[in-house]
Each structure stands twice: as C-alpha cells, then as structure tokens.
C-alpha cells in the first residue's frame, strides 16, 4: 500500500484499529494507553501474517515486555 514515493496510500482511510489514538478514544476511553498500544500491535501483526506480508513489517513486541 505504498506509493511510488514510499508513502502510505491508505493512511487517511485506514481501519479504525490501525488509528491507535482514535480507536483508543472511541473504543477504550478509560483503558491504559500502553495496554491499548500492545493490543493494537498484536492485531496489526496478525493482519500482516494473514495477508502474507513481509515479516519486516511486524511490530517488535519486546517493547511491551515489563
């Protein structure tokens, strides 16, 4: 979904779950933001794997470890 100049072509119309700040505000107003980032990253990684995308796009989940 990258344009010739390497910019995201679907950024403005991306799925709600991929718009982390907006989805947190609408779906989980009282949820801890760090938990929301982790949940969203897991969903994005699942999409990447299911779509057969290159693993270089996977989010490193180590950043969410305690």
Image (cartoon, rainbow, N blue to C red):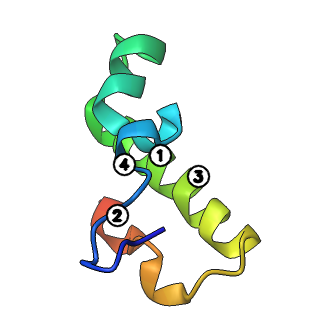
Q: Which residue occupies 41% across, 69% down? A: 61
Image position, residue 13 (x, y; %): 45, 38
> Mark 1 and mark 3: span between their CA atoms?
5 Å
Dot placed on the residue nearer the N-terminal end, 4 or 1? 4
Q: Which residue occupies 41% across, 13% down? A: 26
Q: Residue 65, labelled with which disc? A: 2
Q: Which residue occupies 33% across, 16% down? A: 25
Q: Around disc 2, counting alpha carbons within 10 Å, would you say few (fewer than 14), some (14 to 19), or many (20 or more)?
A: few
Q: Which residue occupies 49% across, 45% down? A: 39
Q: Around disc 1, counting alpha carbons within 10 Å, would you say few (fewer than 14), some (14 to 19), or many (20 or more)?
A: some
- Contact (CB < 8 A) between labels 1 and 3? yes
> Mark 4 and mark 3: span between their CA atoms?
17 Å
Name the outermost residue toward the right. 50
Q: Residue 28, labelled with which disc? A: none
Number of marks drawn? 4
> Mark 3 and mark 2: span between their CA atoms?
17 Å
- For disc 3, the marked residue is 43
Image position, residue 60 (x, y; %): 38, 75
Dot placed on the residue nearer the N-terminal end, 4 or 2? 4
Res. 51 image quadrant: bottom right
Q: Give the mark toward the camera: 4 or 3.
A: 4
> Mark 4 and mark 2: span between their CA atoms?
28 Å
Element class at badge 3: helix
Dot placed on the residue nearer the N-terminal end, 4 or 3? 4
Element class at badge 1: helix
- Contact (CB < 8 A) between labels 4 and 2? no
Is 64 on the left-hand or right-hand side of 54? left
Q: Residue 11, labelled with which disc? A: 4
Res. 30 image quadrant: top left
Q: Nearer the viewer, residue 60 or 53?
A: 53
């Amino acid at each position: 979904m990258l344009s010739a100049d390497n910019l995201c072509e679907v950024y403005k119309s991306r799925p709600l779950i991929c718009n982390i700040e907006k989805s947190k505000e609408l779906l989980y107003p009282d949820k801890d933001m760090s938990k929301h980032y982790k949940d969203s990253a897991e969903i994005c990684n699942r999409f990447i794997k299911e779509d057969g995308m290159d693993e270089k796009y996977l989010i490193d989940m180590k950043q969410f470890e305690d």
